[in-house]
Amino acid sequence: MFADLCHFYQMSFIARDLDRATEALSRRFGITRFRRRQSAPWLETAHAWSADAMIEVMLIGEGAPALYAGYTPEDPAAIRLHHHGYRVADEAGWAAIERRVADAGLEAPMKGAAMNGDLRFLYVDTRRELGLYSEFVMLGGSAAGLYDDVPRN
């Protein structure tokens, strides 16, 4: 439905303890270097490239949107898959994604823009079909280099 408009780039997980989760990823899978950020008052993230895929581990706090509820694992070292991320290259692709989501009757529980509109994101509820959410991201202008400092493992 979307493969001609975007490409897969990210697996995003939720953790109970960001330190313990990233330590476990390091020990078990050799993902040793992360970029950490406080992305919102309710969200701290750790990002790392593993080959051509980005790993995102999120620590979700109080005040987070409802789509994150119920994903935090009990084990502080564990992570739970929340969404796959797809990059959209341009305005035409973004408009097409929005049309296809609407035409398919899919719910989009979170949509927004940041960095003066240079970063756009759209979470689509694909849990019935895929078992997880799908996030579409378009980066341009000042957001084009947003992931440039994410370490490669």
Image (cartoon, helix red, strand yellow):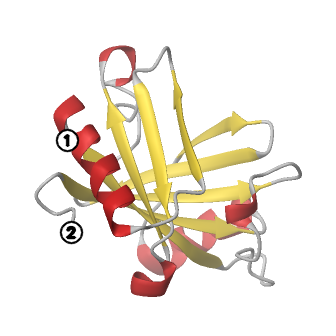
Q: Quadrant of the N terminus?
A: bottom left
Is residue 90 visible from the viewing direction of this image? no
In the image, residue 130 above or below residue 39: below
Direction from residue 4 to residue 102 in the image, left or right? right
* Residue 70, percent from left and from top: 76, 77
The reply, left or right, for residue 1 in relation to residue 74 is left
Residue 137 picture quarter: top left
Among numbered discs 2 and 1, the one appearing first in the sequence = 2
List x then y, in percent, for residue 146: 40, 29
Q: Residue at x 40, y 21 (%)?
A: 118
The residue indicated by pointer 1 is 93
Task: Please name the amino acid that badge 2 sits on.
Answer: Met
Q: Residue at x 44, y 67 (%)?
A: 106
Secondary structure category for the residue under label 1: helix
Depth check: 15 or 118 in front?
118
Question: Along the line of sight, which residue is nearer the eye, 130 or 8?
Answer: 130
Q: Amino acid at mark 1?
A: Gly
> What is the x, y in percent for residue 6?
20, 52
State the residue position of label 2: 1
